Amino acid sequence: MAYGYASQERDHRLPPALRAPFERRTWREVGYALLNLPMGIAGFVWTVTMFSLGAGLLVTFVGLPVLVLALGGCRAIGRVERARARSLLWLDIDEPGPDPRTGRGFLARIGARLSSGVNWRHAIYCLVHFPWGIFTFSVSVSLVTYGWGLLSYPLWQWVFPTYAHQKGLQIYGDGDGRGWYLHTPADLALTVVVGGLLVLVTPWVIRGMAHVDRMLVAGLLGPSRLAGRVSELESDRGVVVDTAAADLRRIERDLHDGAQARLVALAMDLGLAKEKLLDDPEAGARMVAEAHGEVKIALQELRDLARGIRPAILTDRGLGPALSAVAARCTVPVSVTVDLPGRPVPAIEGIAYFTVSELLQNISKHSGASRATVDVWQTEDRLMLHVSDNGRGGADLSAGSGLSGLAERLDSVDGVLALDSPTGGPTRITAELPWRV
């Protein structure tokens, strides 16, 4: 859900109180309030008529299809209302989801539609919107008519003596022509003052009612919180699966191109050395010594690969020593402060470790910084990471960058990555992860 008023209105020198009656937003919201009445009548008449007919026909088989048709009509009205809110209120509401048609057979499809909470929320909206539409229509018409009518009264006051044969607009009076008619200069000044006050108050009353309209549309015609959460979890699951697949491909590539190729070459060298030991012992010994060096290199590559999966120091000693080891390998001096009462679950601890590791790699490669700091602490049920440097800044979370991938990985576990990196520096990155003990 998003609002678009900030980008729609231009800057003005007039204060908001004087500018509001003339803003496009105000008149869009007035139009929305005026349309509430016909839309409310249409939705209410359809809902009451069709549900009454369906309930009355439940004694026969026809009642169920009529109720399904009633819910389908409410969904159609909901689509119109979302489009109206998008056009006049600049309120972008996602579709609540398709009309459920699960199950095989006619009765199964009817049952799915009748048990859909989305359908019934649309029906509730059609019922609730009718009295609200009457209220908003009446208030809007009254405020706009009386406000602008009284403000402009001196311009059309001449109508009364010319065509109605009375001094002016009658406020009260009796049948003998006695009463209060607005016609004196003081009366005209009073009407202008009252009309001006109404004109200034009207936009804020309209905006208050429009805010209620937004809540009705978002709460009853948009996706539910549960549906939004399910969609978010599905997206996060896709990110986790893609990340895991990428990590497996990296490990496979590193094994194939690194340690595996080196071990194959080592086996061949040892075979040649075995043959040489009988004919040329010195050459065979030299080949064995070279193979021993290859074994050390292969072991180091395997250690590096294991560290990339989950370093032993993180498993054995926790986040503080592991981050200190990462900082020691950074080309920039890094100050590490870890203040944790305990250890989070291994999955969160691993994500925190690799997050800081990648951020420190970025500092080494791209920042041009002379120093950096890493702070880790716990706030309630959240694990907080803060990495900063005094480099050139200018980092962003644009699509395709390493930081955007890092943000997606944190989001997959309900984490958040916040970046503050103005051009010229400094760069400050804060990551927030669930603790999940």
Image (spheres, helix red, strand yellow):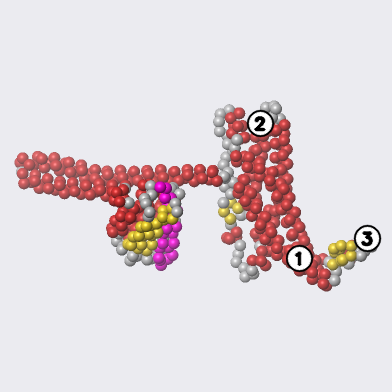
Asked which secondary structure carries label 3, the reply is loop
First along the sequence among labels 2 and 1 = 2
Q: Quadrant of residue 107?
A: top right
Image position of 324 (left or right of 431)? left
The residue mark sitting in front, 3 or 2, is 3
Q: Position of residue 65 (x, y in %)?
A: 66, 31
Sort mark 3 into few (<14), some (14-19) or many (20+) by Cα contacts within 10 Å.
few
Question: What's the distance in space between the residues labelled 3 and 1, CA to CA?
Answer: 28 Å
The amino acid sitting under disc 1 is Gly
- The extreme right residue here reads 176
Question: Does residue 396 show up?
Answer: no
Mark 3 = which residue? 175
The amino acid sitting under disc 2 is Leu
The amino acid sitting under disc 3 is Gly
Mark 1 = which residue? 195
Image position of 330 (left or right of 279)? right
First along the sequence among labels 3 and 2 = 2
Mark 2 = which residue? 64
Question: Does residue 232 show up?
Answer: yes
Asked which secondary structure carries label 2, the reply is helix
First along the sequence among labels 3 and 1 = 3
Asked which secondary structure carries label 1, the reply is helix
Q: Position of residue 15 (x, y in %)?
A: 64, 68
Q: Position of residue 73 (x, y in %)?
A: 66, 39
Image position of 347 (left or right of 267)? right
Q: Position of residue 172 (x, y in %)?
A: 87, 62
* Residue extent of the magenta highlight: 415-437
Image position of 215 (left or right of 386)? right
Q: Quadrant of residue 274?
A: top left
